[in-house]
Image: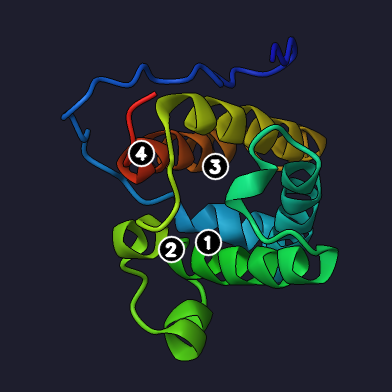
Amino acid sequence: MNFSSSSLNFNILPYQEGVKPPVTKPNPAFLTEIGEEGMRDLFRRFYTSLHKSTIKDLFPQSEEEMMIASQHSADFFIQICGGTPYFNQNRGAPQMGRRHAPFAITPEARLHWLVLMEDALQPLVGQISDENMQSFWDYVNVFSIWMINTRE
């Protein structure tokens, strides 16, 4: 998307098989700006879109289970942004590669996931500083590469 009045760059990094670029955690100030409830709202929006998307089969099929998954993701992102370690407290160490291993995550599925994440972030543009928003986007952009576990 093109956010004309901001300096944000929501370009998607190309996937290169076998290459896992270094991951840098988002600025903790992203969580400070959005707040825990804002993070939970972000992931509710995101998972509502995922539930209707072309990659919905990678996720729980019931709306209730999907909202539980959104809470787990919000817990993870609150923690990764320097907040309370809810994910570790409720689910154990993240080990995201292992947790995602049962699902066939292709480079194409990653692209769909990122487009929906960008859409979910759009309402926050102008409310969150460009620097912190960019930091969050850069993290999910690279993190999503690490989750790919299946060829097209």
Q: Are marks 3 and 4 in contact (CB under 8 Å)?
A: no
Report x, y in % for residue 17.
Answer: 22, 24
Q: Earlier in the sequence, mark 2 or mark 3?
A: 2
Q: CA distance from mark 2 to mark 4?
A: 19 Å
Report x, y in % for residue 22.
Answer: 21, 39
Label 2: which residue?
A: 80
Rate crowding at label 2 as few (under 14), some (14 to 19) or many (20 or more) other CA atoms within 10 Å: some
Amino acid found under the numbered disc labelled 4? Ile
Q: CA distance from mark 2 to mark 1?
A: 5 Å
Q: Are marks 2 and 1 in contact (CB under 8 Å)?
A: yes
Secondary structure under tag 1 reads helix
Point out the frontmost of discs 3 and 4.
Answer: 4
Rate crowding at label 4 as few (under 14), some (14 to 19) or many (20 or more) other CA atoms within 10 Å: many
Point out the frontmost of discs 1 and 4.
Answer: 4
Amino acid found under the numbered disc labelled 3? Asn
Secondary structure under tag 2 reads helix
